[in-house]
Amino acid sequence: MKQNKNEKKSIIIGLTGGIGSGKTTVTELLLEKGFPVIDADKISREIMDEPKTGCEVVDCFGENIVDPDGKIDRRKLRKIVFEDESLLKELNKIFHEKIRNRINIDISSLKKDGKSVIFLDAPLLIENKLDKMVDEVWIVFCSIESQIERVMKRDNSSRKEIEQIIKRQMPLDEKLECANLVFKNDGSVLELKEKLESALQSLNERV
Ligand code: ATP
């Protein structure tokens, strides 16, 4: 990302990983420690609720995509694009630039506040090429079995549903090729916390 003359040098770290790998757990620890974390999913939900986006989505997907309150029915939209890759591309056309712009605004504002380390939590960091906006990519991962068991427990969803989601996500080994740092999260949360502490310590020596 280009550095504005008035902005302090900061390091931007993209945090990503597959479903149930432990991103939120890492993010919560980062927030507890006072690091700023930009939440790409939250940005995308906010953009979805903007009237202008709503109109563009309706133009593309039809009136049926709107729920009785006049808001985009996210579940319906997710199901449609999950089943049809060409429609996913259309949806991405509507969203990507808006999401990038918002992330850039948030990064600039955090830089102006003097933050030297900024995290971007984005489950689809690599798939949506948001990794081009960051200086480093940190990936949290665990075995597929841990992903399934943890998400089944967390969301009350079925093994089959989770397996389908995992199958649709970018394969872990492709993701790992983009990583500057990885957190293997097959142990306890405490172990994950210790790995993060050590990563933050070495980061501290670099900024
Ligand atoms: P998603 O992509 O679905 O949002 P995520 O990558 O954010 O998932 P988390 O929500 O952090 O993953 O973790 C999934 C579940 O596993 C949560 O209920 C979390 O508390 C639990 N969890 C995370 N790490 C561990 C661990 N090391 N041991 C046991 N449970 C864990």
Image (cartoon, grey):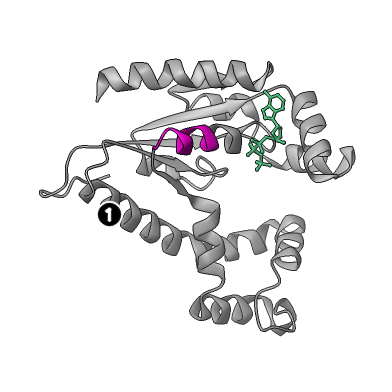
For the point 21% across and 50% down, which residue is it? 112
In the image, ligand 1 is in what quadrant?
top right
Amino acid type, callout 1: Ser
Task: Specify whether residue 33 is painted magenta.
Answer: yes
For the point 81% across and 40% down, which residue is it? 162
- Residue 147 x, y percent position in the rendering: 74, 30
- Quadrant (top left/top right/bottom left/bottom right) for the C terminus: top left
- Magenta span dominant secondary structure: helix
Q: In this view, does 38 lie to the left or right of 23?
A: left
Q: In this view, does 149 lie to the left or right of 48?
A: right
For the point 30% across and 22% down, which residue is it? 204
- Residue 145 x, y percent position in the rendering: 80, 24
Q: State which region is magenta.
A: 27-34
At numbered mark 1, what does the secondary structure look like: helix, strand or loop?
A: helix
For the point 67% across and 76% down, which residue is it? 61
Task: Specify whether residue 78 is painted magenta.
Answer: no
Image-quadrant location for residue 168: top right
Vertical arrangement, residue 106 with respect to residue 165, above or below = below
Which is nearer the eye, 201 or 129? Answer: 201
Which is nearer the eye, 72 or 126? Answer: 72
Vertical arrangement, residue 138 with respect to residue 12, above or below = above
- Residue 157 x, y percent position in the rendering: 85, 45
Q: How many labels does the image show?
A: 1
Q: Mark 1 points at which residue?
A: 109
